[in-house]
Amino acid sequence: MSDSSAVEPWVRRSATPKLDRILVTPEGVPLNVTVAAAGARAGALALDIVIIAGLIGLATLIGVLLLWAFGMAFDGVLEKASGPLQVLAVLWIISVFLFRNAYFLYFELGDRAATWGKRALGIRVAARDGGRLTAEAVIARNIVRDIELFLPLVFLTSGEASGTMTDLTAWAGFLWVLMFLLFPLFNRDRLRGGDVIGGTWVIRNVKRNLGNIVAPAAAKPSPDGSEPAARYQFSDADLSVYGEYELQTLENVLRNDQEEALQKVAESICRKIGREPGSGDERAFLEAYYTALRGRLERSMRFGKRRKDKHSAPE
Amino acid sequence: MSSEQTSGMALLRSDRFRLEREGDWIRLEDIVSKMEKGRSRRLSDEDVLALPTLYRTLLSSLSIARENSLDAGLIHYLEGLALRSYFLVYGTQTSFARWLGSFFGGGWSRAVRAIQFDIWIALFVMIAGAAIGYLLVAGDSDWFYALVPGDFADVRVPGASEEALRGTLFGGQNEDGLGLFAAFLFSNNAQVAILAFALGFAFAIPSILLLIHNMALLGAMLWIFAQRGLTAEFIGWLSIHGTTELFAILLAGAAGIHVGRSIAFPGSRSHLAAASDAGKRAALVMAGVVVMLICAGLLEGFARQLIDNTAGRFGVGGGMLLLWLIYFIGFGRTSRRAGG
């Protein structure tokens, strides 16, 4: 058997095999997931920061407009109208606190478990153990964001501005920023500090459509009345030259339905099994061959025998 | 089996498997898409009730397909849909209101009791910090300037007269901008508390240092006032909001220590499992700390300026402390006993 290695045949090998993981649902069914790449995480964070800054700016703008409206209404007695001014200032302080802290909480507690930035990049938060993503986990992962991001930013900018940055503190601060910002790069699952505390990770969203049946024509009678399966008969020898890998390549060619590719693949299959190429009806031929090959491979699969590709021994 | 033989290769068994079930899959996909777009309110009751069943059916379809079908496109589709519906079935299902209910109804006090050991550590550290601050300044008053940042120390410096000090404690009731002051205090203190917690991530040591530093500042202040015989007045001024605020900082520091301690000494569990268990418990405590700090901000901004005598301040501060203790020690015990 070709798949004698410990890897199960359904385990996916994507374009970024380093980020492929298995998540076991509480029902015990393992699912293939892909950890979000560091670049996607950084991009989502940058978007979120821009959005938060925008929201704070908007709140400030509304505050200023209201102030201006008060000014018009009271006509120059603004100094005496300290009541409404204070209420505005209180609202502003509270809204900045909320934008900074509750933005992530609100969106990651929603159905999609992703902020706007994460949605744009097609990633989401999930519980690492495959269980339910709890409110506590989301709070925990976001409360640590403060030392990872906002604190170093404040530290660097305020230290720079007030000139209290000596060489030593500057370097210490810089190391601090680096340590937490680059933390995700130093572990396999791209966890940041908050993910470690919260028991969460960030994974890629998936959205795939249900394609058609790969070879529908093979089942239907052709216009001239004859069944394609009857037109193309394949012997055991014809079908034993390929394995699952080739079958899936053929599936892709059939799904994409490119004239040129169909012709090329039909030719190479014909050469392999010793037939005359160029029947003029490559699609029908390929569908018939695909159906026959899949039928054969699936039959032996049901008996527990799988054939990975053409290089592995036939069943 | 017989139909497969009579019609020859007409339709693969795995394709028939798909055709028999794809109606359910498409229905599930429709429900999932609507929920993901936040339109779950438009779903009919039957659809909502059907979601878990359809999800489990899909998982079994996926398991069968993996063993019986070589249609890679189909398996990818089933995997993707299974993951999407898994997230909805096992998503954060509690509504915010329901979570808040369980939080105040015992979740918070249980979490606080669960980190009791760390609270004792944090309390010890805080008392030690205050004592260090007091003794350092008592030994050499120059220490005061090292401990207390400049903007804090306006008139409250070593050698200040009694009247000047008394002025900072009383007579603020005519002050404007109490609400603004309260909001500022809350926002500032909440960030400090979050910091105290978050620093626990680095093996709890920064949390402990932060607690010592803040309490040393307090101890130094206490010495200044004690020099002029204003000890009781100062403690009264502090306690009206301080019992709540210091309690909140104590809890935040304890939560940080709890996380740091379980990362450093995970016991029989893995480091990551220990960290996330402790992190979730500490997160509940921290959510409560923010609530306490809102109370403290209101007390500090309004009550302290409005109640201008030491006895009243002690009364409010002591009352708050009693309330918190009753809540943390007594609340939510029954449900834990019921749960075993």
Image (cartoon, rainbow, N blue to C red):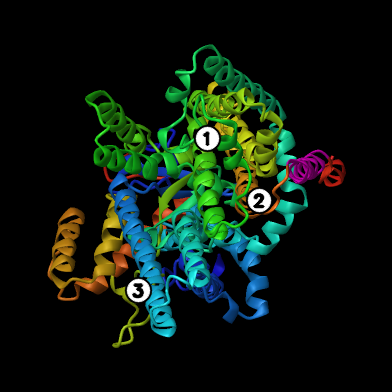
Q: Which residue is mark 3?
A: A218
Is disc 2 placed on a helix, strand or loop?
helix
B126 shown above or below A59: above
Residue identifier under label 1:
B196
Q: Give the residue at mark 2.
A: B299
**Front residue of this view, candidates A248 and B184:** B184
Determine crowd level at label 1: few under 14, some 14-19, many 20+ residues with C-alpha closer than 10 A.
Answer: many
Amino acid type, label 2: Leu
CB under 8 Å between callouts 3 and 2? no
> If the image is split into quadrants, where does the N terminus of chain B sit?
bottom right
Residue B172 shows up from this direction: yes
Label 3 neighbour load within 10 Å: few <14, some 14-19, many 20+: many
Given the image, what chain letter belongs to the residue carrying mark 3?
A
Instruction: Please state which amino acid type lies under the numbered disc 1.
Output: Ala
Which segment is the magenta one?
B310-329
> What is the number of callouts on the image?
3
| Amino acid carrying mark 3 in the image | Ala
